[in-house]
């Protein structure tokens, strides 16, 4: 399936660090914001209040606590916030969205396409426009999410779908795992020049994201798996790395 992706202009994206290695991404336009996967409310509230920004919407990629744990407290401060997430039994009110639906956020005049990517969990979805992919725990810098619920085949398909998005799309992953993932990838492809260059370029970098699809296609061993069998073998090896 080919997804037609909307174009959003004049937005800025910034990471909000939470827990040990999570990123909560903030999409900002003027004084309005959308937050992706708020596992914790306090670092989000801190930045919203400091910069006097109004929270208009929350996007949820999947059910894990480190992605939704802050939602209830954000609702207390912003009772009108609109929440979009996958089909699931969340204990807060939200708009359920499914494959190929468009999430329109009028306050920021932006819209994002929903793409279902089962694998890490069965409910996993991602949100994309032409230039930005908020991929939760489906893709990581040089890696992919563990399979908690889905099958190898489901995850492999999900990664193939995302591989067909525009090469220049920026990838906003929910965890900072890139450097460790590069070490694993180098074990598989020690002569991959792009991988060696990526490692070198990140040496003194703290926040390694966003990356781009083009960069991941050259270096990410899971997007580079040629067959399902190879994907499966790599995923199992990574679990024990
Ligand atoms: Zn997760």
Image: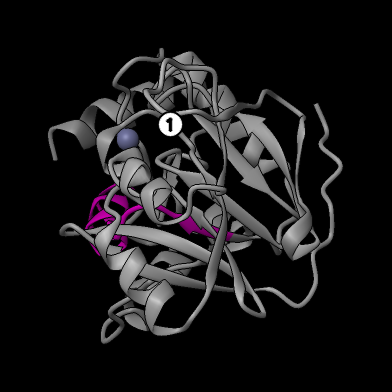
Does 163 sit above or below residue 2?
below
- The residue under the point 65% across, 59% down is 132
Residue at label 1? 62
- The residue under the point 40% across, 56% down is 77
Magenta residues (range): 171-188
- Does residue 83 appear in this view? yes
Does 7 sit above or below residue 49?
above
For ligand 1, tell me if the residue under mark 1 lies within 8 Å. Answer: yes
Residue 176 forms part of the magenta stretch: yes
- The residue under the point 43% across, 31% down is 62
- The residue under the point 46% across, 61% down is 25
Does 199 sit above or below residue 227?
below
Secondary structure predominantly adopted by residues drawn in magenta: helix
Viewer-nearest residue: 120 or 97: 97
Left or right for 42, reference 129? left
Viewer-nearest residue: 220 or 57: 57
Q: Position of residue 8 (x, y in %)?
A: 79, 64
Does 100 sit above or below residue 29?
above
């Amino acid at each position: 399936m080919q997804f037609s992706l909307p174009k959003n202009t004049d937005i800025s994206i910034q990471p909000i660090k939470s827990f040990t290695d999570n990123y909560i991404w903030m999409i900002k336009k003027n004084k309005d914001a959308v937050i992706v996967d708020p596992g914790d409310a306090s670092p989000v509230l801190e930045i919203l209040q400091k910069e006097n920004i109004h929270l208009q919407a929350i996007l949820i990629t999947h059910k894990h606590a480190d992605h939704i744990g802050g939602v209830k407290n954000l609702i207390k401060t912003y009772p009108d916030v609109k929440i979009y997430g996958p089909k699931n039994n969340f204990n807060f009110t939200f708009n359920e969205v499914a494959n190929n639906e468009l999430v329109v956020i009028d306050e920021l005049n932006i819209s994002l396409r929903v793409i279902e990517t089962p694998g890490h969990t069965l409910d996993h979805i991602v949100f994309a426009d032409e230039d930005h992919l908020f991929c939760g725990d489906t893709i990581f810098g040089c890696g992919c999410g563990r399979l908690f619920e889905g099958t190898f085949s489901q995850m492999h398909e999900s990664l193939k779908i995302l591989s067909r998005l525009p090469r220049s799309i920026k990838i906003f992953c929910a965890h900072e795992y890139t450097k460790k993932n590069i070490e694993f990838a180098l074990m598989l492809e020690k002569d991959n020049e792009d991988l060696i260059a990526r490692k070198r370029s990140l040496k003194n970098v703290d926040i390694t994201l966003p990356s781009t699809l083009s960069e991941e296609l050259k270096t990410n061993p899971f997007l580079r798996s040629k067959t399902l069998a190879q994907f499966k073998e790599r995923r199992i090896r990574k679990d024990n790395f």
